[in-house]
Amino acid sequence: MKVIPNIDAKRVPAHVAIIMDGNGRWASLMGKPRIFGHKNGVQSVRESLEAAVQAGVKCLTLYAFSTENWSRPAGEVNALMTLLVSTIRSEVDKLDEKGVQLKAIGDISKLPSKTHKALVEAIDRTKDNTKIQLVLALNYSGRWDISQASRKLSQYISENHLNPDQIEESMFSQFLSTAAFPELELLIRTSGEQRLSNFLLWESAYAELFFTDKFWPEFRKEDFFEAIMDFQKRERRFGKTGEQLKAVVR
Ligand code: IPE
Ligand code: IPE
Ligand code: MG
């Protein structure tokens, strides 16, 4: 693996998630329609994935379409869904070659049938790959996930597999769509906005947050590495004191 200067290979976050924001504003600045921004965001996805593989990240989750994004003008929603189909189809060979396992979270059954088909085919095609998991959050929101997990858990209880007072955090997590992925450690958002917009609400409980003013189509490999370097400078205390952590290291 290529050595990346200033990144400590032993402290690379296992799971990084990105709120890819700012496509529309970037396009407007260029005097172009919003979809131009979405199209140019594809290169940023390629670069982030490449950087994640190089750094040794095991799981990269990308917020591609939120449950709230259905409220956008129909023309933009359709263009995004079409872009997804063409991107998945054109990238799947490369993803497979590189050992990427494609996954999705969100209620993908509500996606247009062409988008759903392209996605499911690519997921199936790459299912045995082990280098990195690339998770697309599509028709996803954190509250949706917590609600659907609660529904499944209630069903489980009603079938007498479980007693309500046995419910614990670790068990609840097993019902979330992210159950099979490593703990989220770093969450990046582009475009200067500093909010979660209903993304990975449960999972971001102790994630480090990294915000950049760059719009998503401007985001490059170096920006991904910068976020990892910033992550590595932080002291992750998980409720303890800094002194306690130093005592463990000694
Ligand atoms: C993020 O960019 C892409 C999606 C939400 C699909 P936006 O489309 O939100 O761009 P801005 O935030 O309006 O600039
Ligand atoms: C969040 O971006 C959703 C995605 C990146 C897919 P939005 O642009 O939709 O978020 P808000 O509406 O500004 O919070
Ligand atoms: Mg936005």
Image: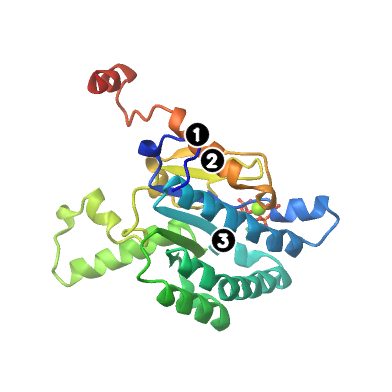
Label 2 vs label 1: CA separation? Answer: 6 Å
Indicate if the residue with disc 3 has its beta carbon within 8 Å of ligand 2.
Answer: yes
Label 1 vs label 3: CA separation? Answer: 24 Å
Q: Residue at image x 61%, y 63%?
A: 69
Task: State the residue in front, 82 or 204.
Answer: 82
Q: Position of residue 73 (x, y in %)?
A: 71, 68
Snapshot quadrant of residue 78 = bottom right
Q: Position of residue 15 (x, y in %)?
A: 40, 49
Position above or below: 239 against 201: above
Q: Residue at image x 34%, y 48%?
A: 183
Look at the numbered discs 2 and 1 and tell me whether their residues touch, using CB distance below 8 Å.
Answer: yes
Left or right: residue 238 compared with residue 102: left
Q: Is any part of residue 117 visible from this angle?
A: yes
Q: Residue at image x 65%, y 50%?
A: 216
Task: State the residue in front, 157 or 111.
Answer: 111
Q: Residue at image x 83%, y 53%?
A: 30
Query: What kind of residue is marked 1?
Result: Met
Q: Residues within 10 Å of mark 3 (few under 14, many from 20)?
A: some
* Element assignment for label 2: helix
Q: Residue furthest right?
A: 31
